[in-house]
Amino acid sequence: MFEEDRIEEGRIGVFGGTFDPVHTGHLLLAETARVQAGLSRVVFMPAHIQPFKQEAETSSDDDRLRMLGLAISDNPHFGITSIETDKGGVSYTIDSLRALREEYGGARICFIIGTDMFLMIEKWKEAEALVSEFDFAVGVRPGYRHDEAVEKAGELREAHGTRIDLVENPPIDLSSTEIRQRIRDGETIRYRVPESVRRFLLVREKVGEKRFAHTKRVIDLATAMAARFGESVEKAGLAALLHDYGKDPGGGVENDLGHGGMAAEAAASEFGVADVDVLNAIRYHTTGRAGMSRLERIVFLADTVEPGRTYDSIARLRDTCLDDLDSGALTVLVELKKYLLMKGLEVSADTEAAIAELSRK
């Protein structure tokens, strides 16, 4: 029998946790539980505040949701719910699972959990109701508290009739705490997290909190514009993520209009980006150039008119950009030239060439 033949339609796995960050171990357990426990899909449920980790500092809800979205984007059987982050406060599993059961039309919910947390299930809020109302898929590893998990599963089955699937948790020793520490220490996290998550984490670490908030707004606008104008959303998101990687959060020479070139070089050398269109979108996002591709125009404009920008005429510029890429690019380039001249700064030859070309259209 093929593994996929075990799948039971309408039985949904819910995988809770902090996911700060989501890592390869999380993804392997989710996929293993999906197949071995016969789940039609798995929904990741990041907690706002975990009851047993109320004093722990975590990344923002937004960052953790974004990383999950990046990590699961290539698996059609995975999804995300923001039910706990939307609610705020301490996240109690029993409340969330009941709400999801109603949201999913009474679907049978299976909670995915690791061995350690399973063995302390009596300490959870409304523990008896939790194990009576919902199924469990418990990730177990040979040699690690395996007999305890088997015994506990037997007790709960007998006492509450709980369906408990013991699934083979791949023996990978990974933790989100370790990954965060490796980033702080400048050590590699490659293969410990999906590549898309690695890029996200390293860009955030490099550019600083304020600049990264700008980066996220550029990502959101660039991907929305890509969808609107028929461009690759994935490429737009990647270029937008890396566009300011050449900037120094402390200021200095890296913050001039040349940082696009440095970011493009880093995208290629540090992140293995080989797509010429993506690299050019990063390289020319500050100056524009003649012959800009659609992706280049999108990233150039998204950087200029993202919602955090508050300078005069921004609303008019944003409307123009969202209506027509050529008109938007010309308008922004002309405004850029005026600004540079007013500040006594040199106007790039690429900017002049772009203005001349777009003016002829």
Image (cartoon, rainbow, N blue to C red):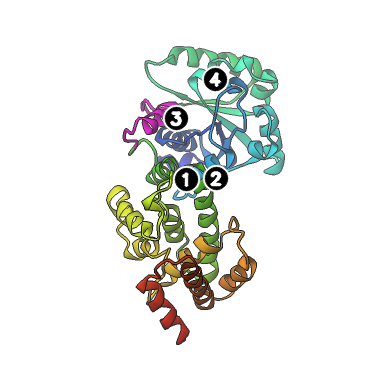
Residue 267 placement (x, y as % from top left)? 33, 53
- Viewer-nearest of labels 4 and 3? 3
Question: Regarding mark 4 in the picture, which secondary structure is present there?
Answer: helix
Q: Using the image as rendered, state which of residue 185 and residue 127 is in the foreground.
A: 185
Query: Magenta segment, which residues?
Result: 168-189
Question: Regarding mark 1 in the picture, which secondary structure is present there?
Answer: loop
Q: Cα distance, mark 1 to mark 2?
A: 7 Å
Look at label 4 and name its amino acid.
Answer: Phe
Query: According to the image, label 2 marks what residue?
Result: 79
Specify which label sits upstream in the sequence, 4 or 1: 1
Left or right position of 219 against 104: left
- Quarter of the rendering containing residue 352: bottom left
172 within the magenta span: yes
Task: Establish if 99 lies above or below 317.
Answer: above
Q: Cα distance, mark 2 to mark 4?
A: 23 Å
Task: Establish if 259 lies above or below 326.
Answer: above
Q: Residue furthest bottom?
A: 360
Query: According to the image, label 1 marks what residue?
Result: 72
Left or right position of 56 against 276: right
Q: Using the image as rendered, state which of residue 138 and residue 176 is in the foreground.
A: 176
Specify which label sits upstream in the sequence, 4 or 3: 4
Q: Pointer 4 and pointer 1: residues touching (CB < 8 Å)?
A: no
Look at label 2 and name its amino acid.
Answer: Gly
Look at label 1 and name its amino acid.
Answer: Ile
Specify which label sits upstream in the sequence, 1 or 2: 1
